[in-house]
Image: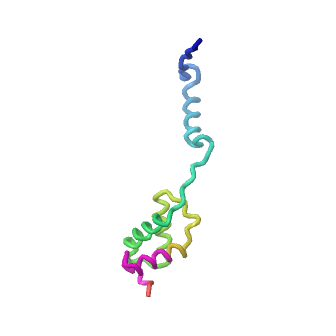
Amino acid sequence: MIMVYEEIDYSEIVPEDVLEEVKEYEEKTSGGRKTKKKYPSSRDIVEAVKEAALKARGIHPDEFPDLVYQILEEQGFDTRHVTVKRIWRTYEKLVRTGAIPDTLHVVY
C-alpha cells in the first residue's frame, strides 16, 4: 500500500511574519555552519602580486603587501596565513624572471 501525502502550505498555518523571520535566520546561519573562506594558492598569490605591481606605481614599498592583501580579500580569500615575507619573495621571483617590471625599485 502506497500512501501519498499532500504537500502542506505552511503559509496558511504559520503567520507570515514568523515565516519570514525563520527564512532570514536560516539564510544567516546557513544551516548552522559558518562558511569558510578558502586560502589562496601560490598561483593566486602570484596573480595578486602581478595585479598589485600594476597598481603600485607611486606607492611606498611598505604599502605594497597591504595592496596584495586587499586584492586577495576582494577575491574572497582568507589571508591570515599569507605572510609579508611570502609576498616579497613572490615579487622578487617575478621581477628576476622578467614576468613583471620592478615598479617599486626594490630588487637589485
Residue visible at 55% across and 20% down in the picture: 8
Q: Is residue 35 left or right of residue 74?
A: right
The residue that appears at 57% across and 52% down in the rendered structure is 36
Q: Reply above or below: 44 against 26.
A: below
Is-magenta flag for residue 108? no
Residue 92 image offset from top left, x and y in percent: 46, 79
x then y, percent, for residue 10:
56, 22
The quarter in which the N terminus is drawn is: top right
Q: How far across and how far down the image is residue 9, in percent?
A: 53, 21
**Image vertical order of residue 51 relative to residue 19, above or below:** below
Placement of the C terminus among the 4 image quadrants: bottom left
Q: Residue furthest top?
A: 1
The residue lying furthest to the front in this view is: 1
Q: Is residue 45 left or right of residue 3?
A: left
Residue located 60% across and 40% down the image:
31
User: What is the quadrant of residue 95 in the picture?
Assistant: bottom left
- Colour theme: rainbow
Residue 51 location (% of width, % of height): 40, 68
Q: Residue furthest bottom?
A: 108
Q: Residue at x 41, y 84 (%)?
A: 105
Q: Quadrant of residue 98?
A: bottom left
Number of numbered labels in the structure image: 0
- Region rendered in magenta: 89-105
Q: Is residue 16 above or below residue 51?
A: above
